[in-house]
């Protein structure tokens, strides 16, 4: 399943029947204005979202970026983490903290 299809599914699960409804909800929740055209292209897999757009869309739809863009669930991530050594897990955590601290 493609990211566009997952995005559409998430929108419909939130009972947002149209892209303009999604646009409005994103703006209300995150104060980010995305064009209907941009959102439509994302649902058709014809564009690449920015990091800011990914965060806003994921926040609004209560989805993770991993699930939306890659189709990976939290359980899949947990299994991957369990395969890492403790040192690798600590390094990964440090990287996440560094990214999270950036504006």
Image (cartoon, grey):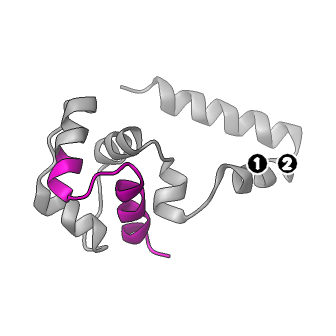
Q: Quadrant of the C terminus?
A: top left
Assess disc 2: are there few (<14), some (14-19) or many (≥20) residues with their C-alpha within 10 Å of its C-alpha.
few
Drawn side of residue 95 relative to residue 28, left or right: right
Q: Secondary structure at mark 2?
A: helix
Instruction: Give the percent coordinates (x, y) of residue 36.
Output: 12, 57
Instruction: Say if mark 1 contacts mark 2, CB within 8 Å.
Output: yes
- 65 in relation to 9, above or below: above
Residue 78: assigned label: 1
Residue drawn 72% across and 57% down? 76
Secondary element at image label 1: helix
- Mark carried by residue 82: 2
Write the residue at 27% across / 65% down. Answer: 42
> 80 left or right of 19?
right
Q: Which residues are magenta?
A: 1-23
The residue lying at 20 percent from left, 65 percent from top is: 40
Q: CA distance from mark 1 to mark 2?
A: 6 Å
């Amino acid at each position: 399943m493609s990211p566009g299809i997952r995005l559409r599914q998430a929108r419909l699960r939130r009972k947002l029947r149209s892209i303009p409804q999604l646009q409005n909800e994103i703006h209300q929740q995150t104060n980010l204005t995305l064009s209907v055209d941009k959102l439509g292209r994302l649902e058709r897999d014809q564009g690449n979202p920015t990091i800011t757009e990914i965060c806003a869309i994921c926040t609004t739809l209560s989805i993770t970026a991993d699930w939306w863009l890659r189709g990976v669930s939290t359980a899949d991530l947990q299994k991957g983490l369990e395969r890492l050594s403790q040192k690798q897990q600590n390094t990964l955590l440090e990287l996440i903290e560094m990214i999270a601290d950036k504006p």
